[in-house]
Amino acid sequence: MERFDNNGVTSIKGSVGVHGVNMNVYMYLTDGVLIDTGSESLLSEYIPFFQAGDYDQVILTHSHEDHTGGARWIQENRQVPLYIHPMAIDECRADGVYPDYRKELWGERKAFKAEPLPMTFHSRTSKWQAIHTPGHAEDHLVFLNQESGTLFSGDLFVAPKLRIVMEQESIAKHIDSLKKVLTYDFEEIYCSHAGYIPNGKQLLKKKLDQIVSTQEEIMELHSQGLSSEEINQQLFPREYPLAVISGGEWDSRHIIRSVIADNE
Ligand SMILES: [Zn+2]
């Protein structure tokens, strides 16, 4: 676990590696708010921070196990509420159910009781807005601190290019969510997997442009009669380690399928 402090935000970075796939996951603490709780596989490293951290509420960007893995420990050991999008509350009330490779990476997300996060809320000194941003996950939220103009972007950014997504992701919703977020006033972002990005808004804009042009390329190749597999070979020729270890739960093919389905 590594810790950095800048502009009133503490970043906690955890790293996991399984079968040649290495991933970082971040949580953030600012103005008495803990944003996400990392993964259960890193819990023993996090506990001293969870114990001593100066926070009076926890807000969760979405229910995936790399964001909610510490929630149960906090619930049992700290008297603070945990908030999430209302649609994720029932799922969080039970232990997480997901494939083994995710358990190897992120551990076993234990049940916890979350409360519905209002779309506007306060930290000690700031007013915040939660922005519903489905695409990666239906329950996905990003958080804007309206005083500092800082955006905590969960899994909305992650990487400058979208090359691989999970099976149930919607490319049309990704696009709508990026457009929605870009209407707000902010510059820097704190991403759950890429960390602090000073020119985050600019990179989100680039990502939107890239997804839109990929969408156009897919539809162009589709209209020329290429199969999904041929389109995949042409646009995403690389084999991604995460696609391999996930047995296809993560795959570039899901991008093509989603785009074609949205346009038919
Ligand atoms: Zn996620």
Image: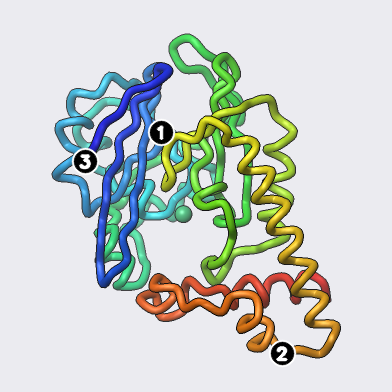
Residue receiving disc 3? 1
> What residue appears at the point 34 percent right and 21 percent down from the top-left corner?
56
> What residue appears at the point 40 percent right and 70 percent down from the top-left corner?
242
Quadrant, the C terminus = bottom right
Q: Which mark is residue 137?
A: none
Distance from the alpha carbon under mark 1 to that under mark 3: 16 Å
Residue receiving disc 1? 35
Q: Earlier in the sequence, mark 2 or mark 1?
A: 1
Q: Is residue 119 visible?
A: yes
Quadrant, the N terminus = top left
Looking at the rendered structure, the secondary structure element under dot 3 is loop
Depicted 171 relative to depicted 220: above or below: above
Asked if marks 1 and 3 touch (Cβ < 8 Å), the reply is no
In this rendering, would 149 be left or right of 80? Answer: right
The type of residue carrying mark 3 is Met
- In the image shown, does 235 or 105 lie closer to the viewer? 235
The type of residue carrying mark 2 is Ser
Looking at the rendered structure, the secondary structure element under dot 1 is strand
Q: Is residue 115 visible?
A: no
> What residue appears at the point 63 percent right and 26 percent down from the top-left corner?
186
